[in-house]
Image: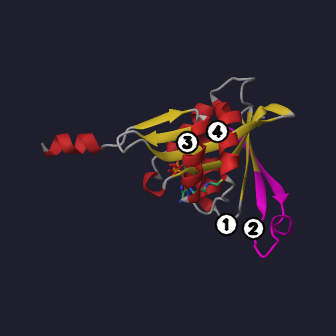
């Protein structure tokens, strides 16, 4: 009986492209994942609708289909071979189990409209989990990593709120 209960409680994760209706849950999920910037509900509805093929939602179906992971991304309009990861997050209780790695791996396997040759993202220098995640992912794929400045703190701060600078990271799978 004890074993049966434990088996029933074991998380079962699903990885799917989001649908428009997921926008609201994604908004609530991102809200629970600091230090990510929270964008408007409208933005998450658009992401889940128009950019669904380059985004990924992960649910724990053993726990009322709770959202436990999300990647919001898009192919850069002028470089369709580049997948831009706008936001990536996993719920606190599920971190450290490679869920982010699995979500991104699935997304780079999508060859629509062309194979993914690069993953691009930005990160705040104080967010070591973010930087380590991307560099570790690159390492696991024997990919090259380039980092550079992207937006300054001045660019992003104003109206009484401060924001750290954002650095850009590019992961290139062509092993140049
Ligand atoms: C960053 C984040 C998405 C990682 O998710 P995750 O599913 O726990 O990551 P993984 O289990 O796939 O970890 C892969 C690698 O990332 C690195 N990493 C993950 N969490 C880390 C942490 N807290 N500190 C340092 N490194 C970390 C490790 O190098 C790890 O590889 P290893 O286990 O072989 O050492 C998650 O911590 C998160 O949602 N954070 C809050 C939101 C956020 O900051 N998102 C990133 C903004 S771009």
Q: Which mark is residue 101?
A: 3
Rate crowding at label 2 as few (under 14), some (14 to 19) or many (20 or more) other CA atoms within 10 Å.
some
What is the residue that sits farthest to the left in this orientation? 1
Do callouts 3 and 2 mark residues in contact (Cβ within 8 Å)? no
- Compared across the picture, whether 147 is left or right of 108 comes to right
Q: Is residue 106 magenta?
A: no
Mark found first going from the N terminus, 4 or 1: 4
Q: Residue at x 20, y 44 (%)?
A: 5
Mark 2 highlights which residue? 164
Mark 1 highlights which residue? 126
Residue 19 vertical position relative to residue 99 in the rendered view, above or below: above
Mark found first going from the N terminus, 4 or 3: 4
Q: How far apart are marks 3 and 2 (CA)?
A: 25 Å
Mark 4 highlights which residue? 48
Front of the two marks 1 and 2: 2
Mark found first going from the N terminus, 1 or 2: 1
Do callouts 1 and 3 mark residues in contact (Cβ within 8 Å)? no
For the residue with label 3, is its CB less than 8 Å from the closest atom of ligand 1? Answer: yes
Rate crowding at label 1 as few (under 14), some (14 to 19) or many (20 or more) other CA atoms within 10 Å.
few
Q: How far apart are marks 1 and 2 (CA)?
A: 8 Å
Q: Which residue is drawn at 66% across and 43% down?
A: 45
Q: How far apart are marks 4 and 1 (CA)?
A: 28 Å
Q: What element carries label 1?
A: loop
The quarter of the rendered structure image containing the N terminus is top left
Span highlighted in magenta in the image: 142-168
Q: Is mark 3 on a helix, strand or loop?
A: helix
Q: What percent of the width, then of the height, locates residue 85? A: 69, 44
């Amino acid at each position: 009986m004890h074993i049966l209960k434990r088996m029933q409680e074991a998380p079962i994760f699903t990885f799917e492209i989001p649908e428009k209706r997921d926008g609201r849950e994604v908004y609530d999920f991102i809200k629970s994942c600091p230090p990510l910037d929270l964008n408007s509900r409208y933005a998450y509805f658009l992401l889940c609708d128009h950019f669904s093929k380059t985004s990924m939602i992960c649910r724990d179906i053993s726990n009322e289909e709770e959202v436990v992971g999300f990647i919001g991304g898009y192919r850069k309009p002028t470089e369709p071979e580049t997948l831009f990861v706008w936001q990536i997050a996993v719920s606190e209780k599920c971190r450290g189990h490679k869920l982010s790695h699995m979500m991104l791996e699935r997304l780079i396997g999508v060859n629509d409209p062309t194979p993914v040759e690069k993953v691009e993202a930005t990160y705040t220098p104080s967010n070591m989990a973010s930087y380590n995640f991307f560099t570790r992912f690159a390492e696991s794929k024997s990919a090259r990593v380039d980092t550079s400045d992207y937006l300054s703190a001045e660019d992003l701060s104003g109206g009484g709120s401060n924001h750290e600078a954002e650095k850009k990271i590019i992961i290139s799978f062509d092993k140049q």
